[in-house]
Image: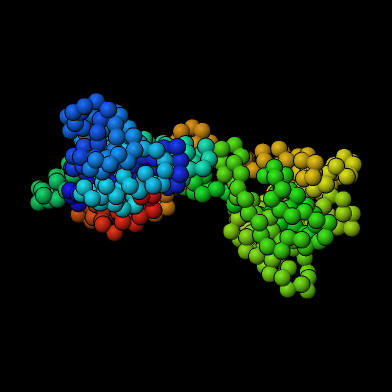
Amino acid sequence: MILKDTIVALATASGVGAIAVIRLSGPNAIQIANECFNSVKENKSLLEQKSHTLHLGHFIDNKRVIDQVLVSVFKNPHSYTGEDTIEISCHGSLYIQQEILQVLLKKGARMADAGEFTLRAFINGKLDLSQAEAVADLISSDSEASHQVAMQQMRGGFSNEIQNLRDQLINFASLIELELDFAEEDVEFADRTQFKTLVARIQLVLKRLIDSFAVGNVIKNGIPVAIVGEPNVGKSTLLNALLNEERAIVSEIAGTTRDTIEDEIIIDGVAYRFIDTAGIRETKDVVENIGIQKTFEKIGQAQVVIYLFDLNNIQYQVSNIKMELESIKNKFPQKQLIVIGNKADTISDAHITALKQEIPELIAISAKSKIGIETLTNELTKLVNIGALNNSDTIVTNSRHYDALLKALNEIDKVDYGLQNDVSGDLMAIDIREALYFFGLITGEVTSDDLLGNIFANFCIGK
């Protein structure tokens, strides 16, 4: 894929601001910008300036001055895209932004497609495909953890690990292919003992990367947490306490929440999406019944379920609580379950101690008084294994990478089987080539226009 035209787009968010940045990239970027630029110093041409320099002047349309601007010059190959690139910093008026864009389009540039600047960076070898995808993740990161993972991938941590495995596998593959050329002489160039050790090491690394996706996926997308329980036990009050704002309506009337309410907060660098659900009970109210059905849907979608009950409700027996907890565990066995007793400020410590003997996992809180909220957030943090993140280990967050790793491991397992059972080299070579293909899909050494189109279509226009 060779891109010979010059593209332009707004690189900053659309709308009014103090400044806006308009980006040009392509073989004619500097020439086009030069035709619209009058330096504050007479007779200064952008074509004659060094790379990575800034120039103050006026952006003009013929003799009409549109704005005073600061122009950044980046000459190939030392730019983000690997092409000649110009960035024009202007005042953030919508009118000024559009006027500058229209002039640049008239001069021969075209509007960039979504993600086209990063696509060009990939095509020109400035980034591999996994690093390019990390750019989009970095832009959309909304927590410390997601930012840290995206930065590590963009710097090439994941790419380097995959490339290292690929290089070692290519080395042995070439030796096995060489054996096939000398099949009649019955010679063995590839040491099978060393090859078995390499395959075992590759299997270990692939399994670790695949397992990391469970953590990476929740870091990237946030952890959905459903708050469930009987009506009027304080679910909405708990949501408000966690968010530290009056997000949900609180009332003593049972059944106030008839639909789910969602909001997100960051705890220890990880995003959690809390879902306040309708109270679970038998009711003839049609609208409330719909809300209860949605509650069970949200439990199914959540990774963590907070079961909340009223410590002050003496009529609600411990046996009933145990029965409901058992029902949730049986219906949703994969869910992490946290048991919370609310309104702890209205009963004695002795009562709470007695309940903990019956329900050892119980955490007693007062959502209204915000007592025990920190204990709850600490418990949530324990459920997320971010040890790998703290150790700067590679964490997979992209479902496309996850799928390619699974398929690569499947092919490596076939190679392992071949080694253990003395399968012929020509059959093993097929499996090795397949594994190399899936490694290449991750870093972009194997691509198609459809694949690139799907990836970069999710980028913003100016990136």
- The residue nearer to you, when weighing 103 against 311, is 103
- The residue nearer to you, when weighing 294 against 29, is 29
Q: Please give left or right for residue 229 compared with residue 196 in the image.
A: right
Q: Residue at x 68, y 55 (%)?
A: 276
Q: Dividing the picture into quarters, in which one does residue 28 lie?
A: top left
Residue 269 placed where, x, y %?
56, 37
Q: Residue at x 62, y 60 (%)?
A: 298
Residue 240 placed where, x, y %?
71, 47
Residue 445 placed where, x, y %?
25, 47
Q: Please give left or right for residue 225 compared with residue 435 in the image.
A: right
Q: Is residue 208 visible?
A: no
86 up-or-down from 133: above or below: above
Farthest front residue in view: 63
- The residue nearer to you, when weighing 13 against 382, is 13
Q: Residue at x 73, y 60 (%)?
A: 257
358 up-or-down from 154: above or below: below
Q: Is residue 275 visible?
A: yes
Residue 86 placed where, x, y %?
27, 37
Q: How many marks?
A: 0
